[in-house]
Amino acid sequence: MGTDFVDFAWGGRKFSPVTASSDTRPHVVILGGGFGGLYAAMRLKRAPVRVTLVDRHNHHLFQPLLYQVATATLSPSDIASPLRGILGRYGISVLLAEATGIDVQGKRVLLADGELTYDFLIVATGATHSYFGRDEWGRYAPGLKTIEDAVEIRRQVLLAFELAEREPEPVRRRELLTFVIVGGGATGVEMAGALSEISHHALVRDFQNIDPSQARILLVEGAAHVLPTYPENLSLNARRSLERLGVEVRTGVRVTRIDETGVYIGDEHIPAYTKIWAAGVAASPVAKSLGVQLDRAGRVEVTPELNLPGRKDVFVIGDLALFKEKGQAVPGVAPAAMQEGKHAAKNILRQLKGQPVEPFSYWDRGMFSVIGRGSAVGIALERFRMSGYIAWLAWLFIHILFLIGFRSKVAVLVNWAYSYVAFRRSARIITGGVPLRGRSSGKSALPAAGAILEEPHKATEPQPAVRSESP
């Protein structure tokens, strides 16, 4: 097989390449430790192949629960497990590195600090945020794809309440307590519901000068309904549930600008300190190096067997793959990535046995979106539609079932039970520093607070609470 790693640098120093001359098994490289990559690796754990999984993070992340980290229900460790802890026991190599491109002719993966050769390749690098050509908006409206994103959003949300507690000007205080979520898909709906619960329950007794329940939470969606991929009746149920929680829902409108001061809907300016992006995703840029035509979202249209067109040795799965079944694209959801990962691994093993590869068939088990405490909407097995408490229980069961690791399941159950019974959030920790004066140079500017330090409010003379009606 020869040398697999060359020209690596660490701390400015190159180290010797790792050779695999003593291991003649076919080398399977998997790019991405998400659901697709992880399930492919697990399917190959006892196969007569050598497996290397490459990811720029050292952990597998349960992305569907990221919003609960962002809204202080769960801690990052509750929804992430170290990849080495999951795969190391099976003799699977885990490489902490960033893939920058793929040379399909030379059968090489190009890394930021070297390269890696393969016999078979599974590309599962997922998706990132898409601001529809307005990447500058990302500075003011972070998306939610990584633990770092979730922790930053949690910081901004909790900091907004802290700064509002110290703000003497009612107009500025109202801006601090305005939260705008752009995008009414599952992430946006779940974020809006969770923010409402924070303001109405978890924080309501924690402040003396403000009433957190008067926070304004605005959800903006360009389509006619929230959860536009759901049947209309479930979308309407979701909207009603959000409005009962106090969320202001606007559909059929477009955001035209996002800056430090807030969000513009058409010509209307909505002053807001916290802006969250949940409106669009784009496939990983690694796809551009594969040498095939991509769709508008940057995805690769794969063969029925999940191969890169013209390459039996390269498979593309998960959010990076555009797989159509009966004329419809398979959704970019965790169950689809899991099934694709296992199928790609199966087809590799079939090739090694001299058997023909088989086409992939997606089993749609359903989709669920939680709206708030005891409330969700969902579809199970393509035809069973449900909403309310029953859907919430189904959502709870499914998410616990697919969490990786016994500790994660127990931790999440305990935190959910505590949050449900006590209306509390156990992870209300602000990280990354707290501003005392001036403005921050971080992702979004922070309000000036110097005057408040010199003349704090008296607890016996609370300032007026923010009102909930539009300015």
Image: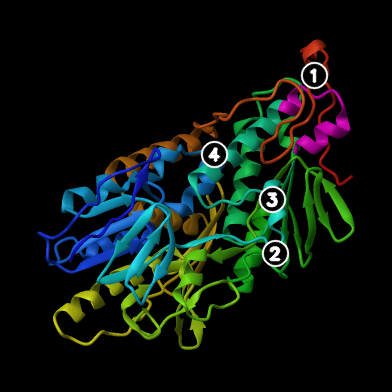
Q: Main secondary structure of the magenta part?
A: helix
Q: Residues within 10 Å of mark 4 (few under 14, many from 20)?
A: many
Query: Between marks 4 and 3, how big is the CA–CA gap?
Result: 28 Å
Dot 1, how many residues are within 10 Å of its Cα: few (below 14), some (14-19), or many (20+)? few
User: If you read the primary sequence from the N terminus, does the residue marked by circle 2 or circle 3 appear first?
Assistant: 2
232 or 195, nearer to the observer: 195
Q: Amino acid at mark 4?
A: Val
Kind of residue indicated by mark 1? Gly
SS type, badge 4: helix
| Amino acid residing under circle 3 | Arg
As helix, strand or loop, the secondary structure at mark 1 comes to helix
Look at the image and say whether residue 176 sits in the magenta stretch: yes
Image: magenta residue range = 163-177
Specify the label residue 102 is tagged with. Answer: none
Task: Name the residue type under label 2.
Answer: Gly
| Residue 166 appears left or right of 150 | right
Disc 4 target residue: 151
Q: Secondary structure at mark 2?
A: loop
- Tell me, for residue 133, which label it has, or none: 2
